[in-house]
């Protein structure tokens, strides 16, 4: 078998056999197929897509390129909620309290942030003393004790994805639905969960810029889940503006805590309520989303959710008192008031620009070796559809004297204010399963 023949077949839109795919990917992983041939294969996939059978085989080969984990010894129903990446997405922090309140386990691998989107691992590390389990046994113990166990991604899980992703990044082949779907699903399938909830972000700050491509991605991932007998529900959610008001690390921890105390932003609260209600439906505990949401509202108002988050923080080595005393979190030195230049309705808050405004302050990484400053970030005061007076504060820039001007420039590029009234964005655009 020769790589060039396989590339030619894909170029001519002829379905590949599993032997051909296995040969190509296997040889690539062993560095016996060079990057230039794999690049050209990826470009052929970009233009011609993959058949259902090809996608299943491709995803399986990716998944099996490294370790496949089933956390033995966990007694809970496991839900893995995964987001395709957004700005201000602190969902996993809130879910640590909410899922546990319903005896739903979380045993997952999470990522660090790169570029304009933050990562869950970085956000939790804003909590002084917080450490993630280092071994699987530690993680299993933690899940059984407090319901939630999260570890950083290791290089042993789907190594082929890492290699291919770096190549896609420099060959303009990231935005291919089958390649994104197999990349995400291979990682989800490699770590066992009873149900998978995928939060596919849609909008200017996300991979998927419009609803049509997001639907296509969602359906492709559901199909992959089906072919592996795994339940997948996808939520298509708004990323035409940041989620909630806080973008950073410590400030996102605070916003997630406030949400579990019933004082969260409307969009973020609705998103977490819907995710947990979906999880309860998958588990079979409720008959409808509405019933699920009522139960979620209950564990927020009776304090169960916040207590579970405290337990999780304590089990990870953090001080649970910070839930009621935010001075125990890292604190920025100064706050700059970014004000509106004109009066009107806010029609756009570009999530990507806000993400970059926070990143340059130190809240995120431009390159993977950058060190995070957990205290800094951007705190919005308004959302799309709100009215603002000229001179009113649109956002607080929470900084430590690093790159403030550059952050302000990103903020200036983020907002559009218009004279006509603007509708508020819906956070949940669609649910597919
Ligand atoms: N997230 C992934 O994990 N993979 C992609 O290809 C795109 C987003």
Image (cartoon, rainbow, N blue to C red):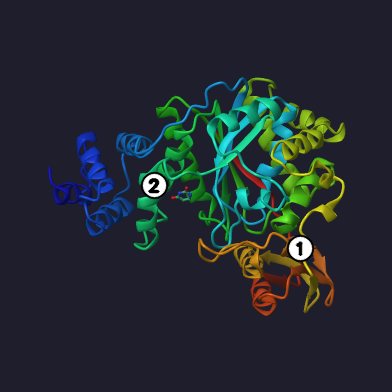
Res 380 label: 1
Res 161 label: 2
387 up-or-down from 208: above or below: below
Q: Earlier in the sequence, mark 1 or mark 2?
A: 2
Q: Position of residue 255 (x, y in %)?
A: 77, 51
Quarter of the figure that contains the C terminus: top right
Secondary structure of the residue carrying tag 2 is helix
Mark 2, ligand 1, within 8 Å: the answer is yes
Judged left or right of residue 430, residue 189 is left
Real-space Cα distance between discs 1 and 2?
Answer: 35 Å
Query: Which residue is painted at 28% across and 57% down in the image?
Result: 39
Secondary structure of the residue carrying tag 1 is strand
Q: Position of residue 275 (x, y in %)?
A: 66, 37
247 up-or-down from 184: above or below: below
Res 266 label: none
Quarter of the figure that contains the N terminus: top left
Judged left or right of residue 416, residue 255 is right
């Amino acid at each position: 078998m020769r790589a060039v023949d396989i590339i030619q077949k894909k170029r001519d839109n002829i379905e590949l056999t599993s032997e051909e795919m296995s040969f190509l990917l296997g040889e690539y992983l062993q560095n016996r197929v060079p990057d230039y041939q794999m690049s050209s294969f990826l470009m052929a996939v970009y233009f011609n897509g993959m058949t259902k059978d090809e996608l299943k085989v491709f995803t399986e080969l990716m998944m099996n390129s490294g370790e496949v984990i089933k956390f033995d010894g966990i007694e809970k129903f496991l839900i893995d909620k995964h987001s395709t990446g957004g700005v201000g997405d602190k969902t996993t922090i809130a879910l640590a309290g909410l899922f546990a309140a319903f005896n739903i386990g979380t045993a997952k691998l999470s990522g660090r942030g790169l570029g304009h989107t933050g990562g869950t691992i970085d956000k939790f590390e804003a909590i002084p003393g917080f450490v993630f389990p280092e071994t699987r046994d530690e993680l299993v113990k933690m899940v059984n004790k407090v319901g939630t166990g999260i570890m950083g991604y290791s290089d042993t899980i789907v190594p082929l994805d890492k290699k291919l992703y770096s190549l896609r990044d420099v060959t303009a082949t990231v935005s291919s639905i089958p390649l994104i779907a197999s990349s995400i699903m291979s990682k989800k399938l490699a770590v066992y969960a009873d149900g998978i909830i995928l939060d596919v972000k849609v909008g200017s700050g996300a991979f998927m810029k419009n609803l049509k491509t997001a639907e296509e991605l969602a359906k492709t991932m559901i199909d992959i889940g089906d072919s592996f007998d795994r339940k997948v529900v996808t939520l298509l959610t708004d990323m035409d503006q940041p989620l909630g008001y806080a973008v950073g690390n410590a400030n996102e921890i605070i916003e997630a805590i406030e949400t579990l105390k019933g004082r969260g932003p409307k969009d973020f609260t609705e998103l977490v309520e819907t995710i947990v209600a979906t999880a309860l439906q998958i588990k079979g505990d409720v008959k409808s989303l509405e019933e699920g949401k009522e139960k979620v509202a209950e564990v927020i108002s009776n304090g169960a959710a916040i207590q579970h988050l405290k337990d999780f923080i304590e089990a990870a080595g953090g001080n649970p008192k910070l839930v009621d005393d935010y001075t125990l979190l890292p604190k920025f030195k100064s706050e700059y008031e970014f004000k509106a230049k004109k009066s009107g309705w806010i029609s756009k808050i570009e999530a990507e620009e806000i993400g970059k405004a926070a990143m340059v302050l130190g809240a995120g990484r431009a390159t993977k070796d950058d060190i995070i400053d957990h205290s800094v970030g951007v705190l919005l005061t308004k959302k799309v559809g709100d009215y603002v007076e000229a001179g009113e504060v649109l956002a607080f820039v929470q900084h430590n004297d690093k790159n403030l001007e550059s952050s302000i420039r990103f903020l200036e590029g983020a907002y559009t204010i218009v004279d006509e009234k603007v509708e508020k964005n819906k956070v949940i655009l669609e649910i597919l399963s």
